[in-house]
C-alpha cells in the first residue's frame, strides 16, 4: 500500500541534514553546558553559536532568544510574563487561536485580568478596525496575542500593521509564529512585536525544541524555576541536540524560502483545482489563495452518508491528513476554528491537507484518487 503524508501542519519529517547535524551532539558532546570544565564549555559554545545564528535569521539579537521545549511552552511563557512581569490586566485575542494560547489565556484570566476577542472576517482574518476600537476603549495595560497564521485554515495577519497599532496605543504584542517560522520571511528589526514563538518540528527540525523571542528591554522572569540556564529566564538543562537541529533547520529553510513557497503553493492550488473539478459542492475554509499560508488547504467536503468516515478511510488507504489541529485529536467537539467562523461547515467533513517541500505531485494525485473514489 502506498503511504502519503499530507499532515505537515501537525509536524514535518526531519530533514536528513538536521539528523546529521544532531548526531555529534548525541554521540560526542555530552557535557552539561552549565559545567565549567572543558566538556561543558564546548557544549556551551555550541549553544551560543546556534543562538547567534538563529537570531540573525529573524533580525533579532542573540540575547532576545530563549530556548524552550517548543511553541506551547513559549506561548505560556509570553502570556504569563505579560501578566506577572508587565502588569497586563487585559488580553485581546481571537476565538481561532491555537489552544496553547486560548487555554493559557483562559487559565490566567481572573477578577484582575480580563480577555476580549477581536472581530474576524469570514476568512478568519483579523479586522484591523475592530482591533483599533478595542485598543482605544481602555487605558489598561493590554496584551494583544494573535497568531501570525492559523494552523487549521491558514489565515494570515499583517504583522507590521497589527504591531504598529499595538505600539500606537501602548499595548504589548505577542504573535504565535509556529506555523510561519521557516515558511514566511520575518525581520524583527522591522516588525514592532514584543514576543514571538517557534517550534522546530514545523519546518523539518526535531520535536521538543523551539524558542521564545522577547524584545530587548522587557523584564522577564522564569516561568519554569530551577537553575540559572537561559540567563535565568528558563530553568532546566538545555536540549543541546535539539537546539543544534533547530539551527540547522533554519539554515535550510531561510535561504530557499521563496523557492519552497512557489513549489508548495503550486501543489496546493493544483489539489484545490482538481477537487473543484471532480467533486460538485466542495468548498474551502479560509481564503485559500496566495494571501494565506501556502502550506495549508482546509477542505469542506459535501455531505455524505458516510462523511464521518472520510478521514478514517483515507488513513486505511495510506493517506495521512487531519480533521483539525493535531493537538486536539480525540475531541468530538469538531474544530473550534471552523465552528467560530462558519458553523454550517460542520455538516460535511472538513479535512486539512498540509504540504511541505518533500511533498510530491504523485503524493497529491494519490490522495486525490482516494477522495474522488469515496465520493463516486
Image (cartoon, rainbow, N blue to C red):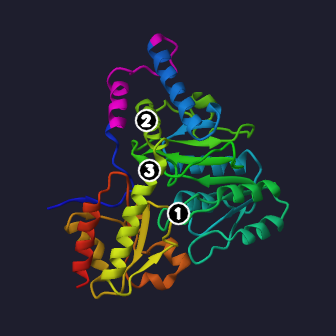
Instruction: Tell me the quarter of the picture where residue 115 sits.
Output: bottom right
Q: Quadrant of the N terminus?
A: bottom left
Instruction: Tell me where residue 62 appears, x and y as whole percent.
Output: 61, 31
The verdict on residue 32 being magenta is yes
Q: Nearer the viewer, residue 271 or 39?
A: 271
Mark before the other along the chain sequence, 3 or 1: 1
Q: Which mark is residue 150?
A: 1
Per the image, the residue denoted by label 2 is 248
The Cα atoms of the two marked residues, 2 and 3, are separated by 18 Å
Answer with left or right where residue 304 lies relative to residue 63: left
Callout 3 touching callout 1 (CB < 8 Å): no
Q: Which of the 4 image quarters holds residue 53?
A: top right
- Check disc 1 and report its element: helix, strand or loop: loop
* Nearest the eye: 291 or 41: 291
Pinpoint residue 236: horizontal percent, then vertical percent.
51, 32
Q: Position of residue 291 (x, y in %)?
A: 55, 65
Residue holding disc 3: 259
Residue at image x 79%, y 70%? 133
Give the class, few, some or many, for how many residues have Cα within 10 Å of label 3's Cα (few <14, many ≥20).
few
Left or right of 352? Residue 141 is right
At 33% from the left and 75% from the top, the residue drawn is 274
* Magenta-tinted stretch: 17-38
Residue at disc 2, secondary structure: helix
Q: Position of residue 327 (x, y in %)?
A: 43, 59
Which mark lies nearer to you, 2 or 3? 3
Q: Residue at x 76, y 47 (%)?
A: 86
Amino acid at each position: 500500500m502506498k503511504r502519503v503524508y499530507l499532515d505537515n501542519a501537525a509536524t514535518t519529517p526531519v530533514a536528513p541534514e538536521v539528523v546529521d547535524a544532531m548526531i555529534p551532539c548525541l554521540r560526542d558532546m555530552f557535557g552539561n553546558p552549565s559545567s565549567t570544565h572543558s566538556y561543558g564549555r564546548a557544549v556551551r559554545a555550541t549553544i551560543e553559536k546556534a543562538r547567534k545564528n538563529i537570531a540573525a535569521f529573524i533580525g533579532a539579537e542573540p540575547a532576545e532568544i530563549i530556548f524552550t521545549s517548543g511553541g506551547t511552552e513559549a506561548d505560556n511563557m509570553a502570556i504569563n510574563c505579560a501578566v506577572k512581569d508587565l502588569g497586563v490586566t487585559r488580553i485581546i485575542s481571537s476565538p481561532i487561536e491555537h489552544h496553547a494560547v486560548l487555554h493559557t489565556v483562559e487559565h490566567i484570566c481572573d477578577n484582575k485580568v480580563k480577555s476580549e476577542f477581536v472581530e474576524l472576517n469570514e476568512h478568519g482574518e483579523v479586522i484591523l478596525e475592530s482591533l483599533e476600537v478595542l485598543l482605544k476603549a481602555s487605558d489598561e495595560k493590554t496584551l494583544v496575542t494573535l497568531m501570525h497564521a492559523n494552523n487549521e485554515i491558514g489565515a494570515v495577519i499583517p504583522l507590521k500593521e497589527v504591531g504598529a497599532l499595538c505600539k500606537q496605543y501602548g499595548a504589548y504584542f505577542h504573535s504565535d509564529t509556529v506555523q510561519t517560522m521557516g515558511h514566511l520571511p520575518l525581520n524583527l528589526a522591522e516588525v514592532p512585536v514584543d514576543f514571538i514563538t517557534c517550534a522546530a518540528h514545523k519546518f523539518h527540525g526535531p520535536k521538543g525544541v523551539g524558542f521564545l523571542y522577547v524584545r530587548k528591554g522587557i523584564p522577564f522572569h522564569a516561568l519554569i524555576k530551577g537553575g540559572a540556564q537561559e540567563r535565568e529566564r528558563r530553568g532546566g538543562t538545555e536540549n543541546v541536540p535539539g537546539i543544534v537541529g533547530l539551527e540547522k533547520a533554519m539554515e535550510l529553510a531561510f535561504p530557499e524560502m521563496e523557492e519552497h513557497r512557489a513549489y508548495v503553493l503550486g501543489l496546493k492550488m493544483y489539489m484545490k483545482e482538481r477537487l473543484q473539478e471532480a467533486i460538485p459542492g466542495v468548498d474551502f475554509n479560509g481564503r485559500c489563495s496566495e494571501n494565506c499560508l501556502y502550506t495549508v488547504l482546509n477542505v469542506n467536503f459535501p455531505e455524505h452518508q458516510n462523511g464521518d468516515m472520510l478521514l478514517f478511510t483515507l488513513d486505511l488507504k495510506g493517506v495521512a491528513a487531519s480533521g483539525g489541529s493535531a493537538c486536539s485529536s480525540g475531541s468530538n467537539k469538531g474544530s473550534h476554528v471552523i465552528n467560530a467562523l462558519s458553523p454550517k461547515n460542520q455538516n460535511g467533513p472538513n479535512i486539512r491537507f498540509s504540504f511541505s517541500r518533500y511533498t510530491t505531485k504523485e503524493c497529491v494525485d494519490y490522495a486525490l484518487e482516494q477522495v474522488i473514489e469515496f465520493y463516486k
